Amino acid sequence: MRRPASETHGECGPISTGAEREQRLRLDDMVDDYVTWREACGLVVAAYAYWSQAGRQEGRLAFAEYIAALNCEEDAAAAYQRAVQRVAAAPVSARL
């Protein structure tokens, strides 16, 4: 969830420059993408456990759910990677 640009950040006070504001937004997005990726990893673990214990009749559906969870995790990992790259590519003057 993005914070309003006018919001203050703890004891640091209000954000003073546009570059700092943009970098904080990039960092917030990166953390959000990290959390999303870690949650997707948990879903992969759960889907694998379900599939590995599924009976013959549930096996195909369980496998399909596992593949779907893997695809979601891959998408989340790619989003997190892009967010990290955006933070790393910021000009040195914009880094906090």
Image (tube, helix red, strand yellow):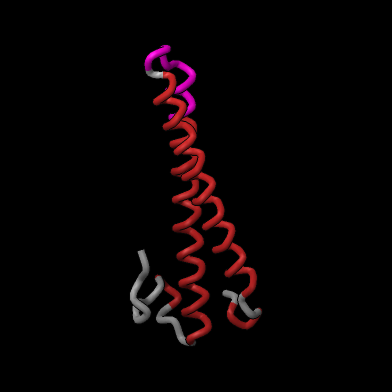
Point 42% across, 12% down: residue: 56
Q: In which quadrant of the rendered image does the C terminus lie?
A: bottom right
Q: Is residue 35 left or right of residue 2?
A: right
Numbered range of the magenta stretch: 47-57
Magenta span includes 56? yes
Residue 12 sits in quarter: bottom left
The residue under the point 59% across, 58% down is 81
Residue 68 at x, y percent in the picture: 45, 38
Q: Is 2 or 93 nearer to us in this picture?
A: 2
Question: Relative to residue 29, is residue 72 depicted above or below?
Answer: above
Figure quadrant of the N terminus: bottom left
Residue 25 position within the rendered picture, expressed as x and y whole percent measured from the top left: 46, 72
Q: Residue at x 45, y 16 (%)?
A: 53
Q: From what the image shows, is residue 96 above or below residue 48? A: below
x%, y% of residue 18?
48, 86
Question: Would you say residue 42 is visible in this rendering?
Answer: no
